[in-house]
Image: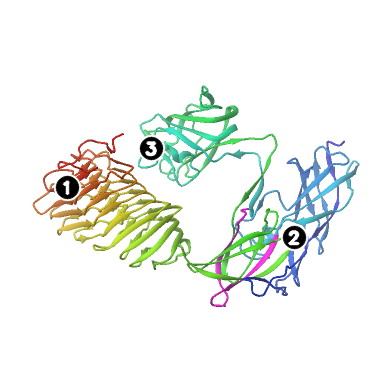
Amino acid sequence: MRTKNIFKTLAALLMACVAFTACSDKDDIANEATKSDDGSTRALALDGTALKVKWAGTDQVAVFKEKTTTLLGTLTAAASETATTKLSGDLTGTVNVGDKLHLIFPRTEWDYTGQKGVLLSVENSIEKKYDYAITDVTVASIDDSHITTTADANFASQQAIVKFILKDKDGGGDLNVKRLTVSAASNKLVTSKRLADIIYYTGYTVDGGSGGISGDGHAHLVDGDPDTKWCANEGPWYIEFHTASPVQVDGYMFRTAGDTYVYPERNPKSWVLKGKANSGDAWTTIDSKSGNTEMPGESDTEHEFIAATSGTYRYFRLEISEVQDGGVMQLSEMKLFAKPAEATEITEYGPVTATLDEAGNEVKMALRNENAGADTYTLTAIVGDEIYALEKSGVTFENGKYYEITAKLTKQKIIDLSAVTEDKEIETGYTITGTLNDHKIALAAGAVVTLDNVTINNSNITCRGDADITLVGTNKITAPETNAALRVGNAGTSLTISGSGSLEATGGAAAAGIGTGLGLDADKTGGDITINGGTITARGGEYAAGIGCGSTSADSDDASTTCGKITINGGTVTATGGIYAAGIGTGAAMRISKSARTICGNITITGGTVTAATAAELGATGIGTGAFFGPGNDGSIIKCGAITIANTVTQVTATKGSSSARSIGKAGDTYYECGTITIGGTEYPEGISDSPYTYPAQ
């Protein structure tokens, strides 16, 4: 047995070959064995239709013992114009005759993300970043400076390399794509493979907590979304959650919020993390900090803490008693982790994407599929802001083989917002997906569309006329000042929202979450709004309703803001108005020197769970009218139509603010009007003053 430095020069042969499977010419995927014009370089090159391999003097191979995570060291290749080289270097550890050594080229962390669609030369080309190979050798003998193995190290490539030649199935011409994504039905396409000495847990269930500000509740701390945060005032603060089964906890991670660089004083300073194995057990302190200043003052930054009392727990309670300064606390994420005795191999799976520097119809990709057998593959290509796709079953890409495939893709009625480069009006029949950080989106009159995991930042969606929107997945729209996040069409039009997905719509200052924007010294009109399903969270900006009207400001001229009927037939709806604005109904009327009018039509709720609230301070009704900001006059009015809550609803809760006499109805009496209020078949001529008011009563 040797425990000091051990050294061996190994002959290594890296083999790469090509194979093609037969396909009918009628298939949408057809293989072609054609000579490539690609030249020869460092690691991978094409010789006819076969990949050949060379070694560079900078190539390195990691050496492990017995396929464990015990790294013995790294060997460096001698430059070679052929597939054969000499590997040499210092190895440190305990090795016996008969041990197996596991060799990995070129490094232990494999990452198939960020591909550029090219084989050679450029940064993120396959030969520079995605050329992974492994082999095993057995120790035959050991002397003072050498290990002798029973055979040469014959490396096997660990991925297929596929050249996709993309065609338009309908038009027949080349598809010049900017981005190509390949996914497998088995979800066994490898995106990364690495050795990890920390294992993070995910999938927490929240049991309770102290709440938060403006929708930034405690549940965001463990929702796995780095773009959300827990933000709350008036501590102390706490959250309780549990995992699906007991887990070993050796530490935990806090992630700062996205605006921590502005508010570093909100980082926790003193806290206690507790745990227990069973719900009925007493709490055990896992870790506690007092006067801690380790949390970074930068945004979106993670910091790990080692537990003082590691152990196996399932239920957890985090208590935060102090922040760095002030009275507001915030964190983006928390995760528990374990530190195993040896590093563990972690494999992540998902779609693999190549993003080209310049659009083209040929895309080369390294793909590793750990599914046993044939799979169903989907190709999704971005051409401009349009999407083309192809699904093909019974496809096998074998590791170590090179394929050239002609794929004929069909245009989809899908708009990827991440590819939008200018303002865009979307016609009927499209599914909208992706993230938009610039440019304006409009729905053509009569459009029937689907929002599928849409994120829109600092912009909005405007309806040119009637619009029908189906929600799929998680959707979020955050509008700029004076713009409604989802802007209903003008008077006489209708907006209908359905589906099983969610929508979080946040209006800009003076604009509704769903409805109209600011009416400034002019008349602004809006149509009817109907919600049939989905999980809707609508927040109005200052002076604007969550669902309904934006605010009206009359200074140099008379002004009005109106919207049509608001009908909720199902779903889970949470609507929050800004100051002087209703949760559902009208926004505020700001009479500066002229007359201001803010008016909405009938409000009818026949189903679902509805929570309507307004700003706690200076707020208006939960459901009904907003309030005046400044005195009213004979030409000014805030008005809503009849309010009907049927006995078929699951639950409706309305909460008023300090500027309102009622939770349902009109916020005041002079210069306010409201139609008949009927709840469960009973009329309430004076509206509802109780707050919060819940129907049916709990």
Q: Secondary structure at mark 3?
A: loop
Compared across the picture, whether 559 is left or right of 608 comes to left
Would you say the residues marked 2 and 3 are in contact, meaning their CB atoms lie under 8 Å apart? no
Question: Can you tell which of label 1 and label 2 is closer to the viewer?
Answer: 1
Q: Which residues are magenta?
A: 160-187
Query: Percent x, y for residue 104?
Result: 75, 50
Of callouts 1 and 3, the N-terminal one = 3
Compared across the picture, whether 55 is left or right of 377 comes to right
Q: Residues within 10 Å of mark 1 (few under 14, many from 20)?
A: some
Q: Residue 174 colored magenta?
A: yes
Q: Is residue 481 visible in this depiction of the protein?
A: no
Query: Percent x, y for residue 52?
Result: 77, 65
Report the amino acid beneath label 2. Answer: Gly
Q: Secondary structure at mark 2?
A: loop
Q: Is residue 167 above or below residue 13?
A: below
Residue 400's label in the rendered image is 2
Q: Is residue 554 above or below residue 23?
A: above
Q: Residues within 10 Å of mark 3 (few under 14, many from 20)?
A: many
Q: CA distance from mark 1 to mark 3?
A: 35 Å
Q: CA distance from mark 2 to mark 3?
A: 53 Å
Of callouts 2 and 3, the N-terminal one = 3
Residue tagged 1: 676
Image quadrant occupied by the C terminus: top left
Report the amino acid beneath label 3. Answer: Gly
Question: Can you tell which of label 1 and label 3 is closer to the viewer?
Answer: 1
Report the amino acid beneath label 1. Answer: Thr
Q: How is the image coloured?
A: rainbow
Residue tagged 3: 212
Query: Percent x, y for residue 690?
Result: 22, 35
